[in-house]
Image (cartoon, rainbow, N blue to C red):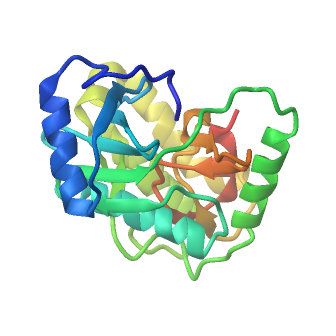
Amino acid sequence: MNPGERTGISATGNGADDELVRRVMAAIGWSGKIASVTELPGGVINSVRLVALSDDRRLVVKTADGAPDGLFQTEADGLGVLRRQGGLHTPDVLGADANWLALEALNPVNGEDPDFWTRAGHDIARLHCVRGPQFGWPADGWLGRLPQYNPWRSSGHEFFAECRILRYLAEPRAAETLTTADRRALERLCIRLPELVPPAPAVLTHGDLWHNNILASRSGAAVFIDPAVSWAWAEMDISMMF
């Protein structure tokens, strides 16, 4: 993440940002003079700030007003799982609590390396070689601020239908947007999933793999952020990458 920082006490012009950053730095054991605090674009759910210190160290601080309990710790845990079990490059987690998450600062994908997405695809292919015991996860998680339910299921069709489609029909925005005909069509689709989708194994998935969640290290390696991990179909990740 590197949005063209400018120096100063706060690039956002908000002294409250500096105070928040100082609290986070104290919690993770960092010290030093803050050169800039820059609001990063693209944060849909959280406020994301790039912090540059006068000694050239950088970190990213994520916060969210009224964050659900466990949101940031779940994200930190997911990053660790993707790194340890899935072999993906993920940002170093510097610290987390109920209200913030501090991460290693990364770089955006600038499109100059024509092989970047090929390497990222190979990374995801290796991730999807990691097989799970069943579909689901030992704990529920979050997709944005919506709970992600991960009960154990032996059937991928049942898991995808119940926990990744029908589960969201009760959410207020879905209830406002979908017509009765829309809901019935989705329910019919879920019934027909075994006819439409061949059986596939449960594999380790990132869970929220749209392109903004793939950044770059200084060496140009793909680095994956903002996971919503579970044992699920590989195609759930792949469909988000397009």
> Which quarter of the figure has residue 78?
bottom left
The location of residue 89, given as percent across then percent down, is 63, 59
Residue 120, compared with residue 65, is above or below; it is below
Residue 194, compared with residue 12, is above or below; it is below
Residue drawn at point x = 64 percent, y = 69 percent: 86
Kindly tell me whether residue 32 is visible in this rendering.
yes
In terms of depth relative to the viewer, which is nearer, 22 or 92?
22
Residue drawn at point x = 64 percent, y = 47 percent: 217
Left or right: 177 with respect to 20? right
> Which quarter of the figure has residue 36?
top left
In the picture as drawn, the residue positioned furthest to the top comes out as 13
The location of residue 84, given as percent across then percent down, is 58, 75
Residue drawn at point x = 21 percent, y = 51 percent: 24
In terms of depth relative to the viewer, which is nearer, 142 or 65?
65
Kindly tell me whether residue 145 is visible in this rendering.
no
The location of residue 179, given as percent across then percent down, is 36, 21
In terms of depth relative to the viewer, which is nearer, 187 or 204?
204
Q: How many marks?
A: 0
Image quadrant containing the C terminus: top right
The location of residue 85, given as percent across then percent down, is 60, 75
Left or right: 155 with respect to 46? right
